[in-house]
Amino acid sequence: MLKLQLAVLEGLAQKERYQMQVFEIAQGLEEKEAIPVVRQQIALIQEIQTEEFWKDVTLPMLENVRKKLRGLVQFLDSTGERKQVYTNFEDELQPEREFPDRIKSDDSRKNYRLKVERFVRQHEDHPTIHRLKHNEPITSADLVELESILFSAEGPGSRETFNETYGTDQPLGKLIREIVGLDPNTAKVAFADFLGRGTLSADQITFINQIIDHFVHIGTMNPKALFEPPFTDFRDQGILGVLPHAATEILDRIKSINENALVA
């Protein structure tokens, strides 16, 4: 980052090479979005991967990136050299075949996703987005109002582009909730009655706080997650091992929070 800042300051040709390195770091970090501290900076990580960010990039912008991401690079996959493996197989050539329906990566769709996420975060004060972030029920009228700005001329793209990227079965409310997450105080209030029970052990309190943290960063929760890591780090049975007597209540609470991201 220092070399990039110097290259920008002095107008050096190496600037593009350093930009690409930062771009690749951001790509690697985006793959680690499940890590809460990475998720907190996901908007910046995704912004770095857009052309708009680099058009008029300034030294303060780069310094902001350096400070916010320097503690996250430890989560990147190692790129060190691997041991060489030698094989002695005889290749068997087959006739050439075409696969016209094979799916190829589409950078334009990825850029569109970034634009949608950035647009949503910039409009968190919109009534519908505010309701979704604060676990308030929404109506079909709320979604119509939201669609009016999402698919407007000032929005990230047309409804056709949205459907091509996300599909027609993706509930808009659920998508928005997953982008903005659940408000931290709202998430705590949703599980306050469980945490207020004086009989909980330290592991049980930590378990519930992890559920809260999940909603804050992911917005919705698949109940199956409670039977997978990191929730099985406490007991192999997940929630049934940690909170057997409150498991049904907690699963119902999770279902209720998820349903508030859908049309009532």
Image (tube, grey):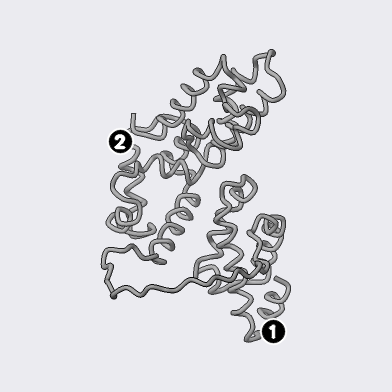
Instruction: Give yes or no for contact between labels 2 and 1 (Cβ–Cβ under 8 Å).
Output: no
**For residue 175, side relative to residue 213 (left or right):** left
Q: Compared to 132, does 95 lie above or below?
A: below
Q: Earlier in the sequence, mark 2 or mark 1?
A: 1
- The quadrant in which the N terminus is found is bottom right
Tell me the number on the disc at residue 140. Answer: 2
Residue 138: quadrant of the picture: top left
Q: Is residue 225 left or right of residue 242?
A: left
Residue at 66%, 55% in the rendered image: 75
Distance Cα–Cα, label 2 vs label 1: 54 Å
Would you say 232 lies left or right of 262 here? right
**Percent from the top left, x then y, of residue 218?**
52, 41
Percent x, y for residue 96?
A: 29, 75
> Which numbered disc covers residue 10?
1
Total numbered labels placed on residues in the image: 2
**What amino acid is at disc 2?**
Ser
Q: Quadrant of the C terminus?
A: top left
Secondary structure of the residue carrying tag 1 is helix
Q: Residue at 41% x, 66% y: name it.
A: 107
Q: Amino acid at mark 1?
A: Glu
- What residue is at 70 percent from the left and 19 percent from the top? 201
Q: Residue 229: image x %, image y %? A: 58, 37
Label 2 crowding class (10 Å Cα cut-off): few <14, some 14-19, many 20+? few
Identify the element where label 2 is drawn.
Answer: helix
262 to 19, vertically: above or below: above
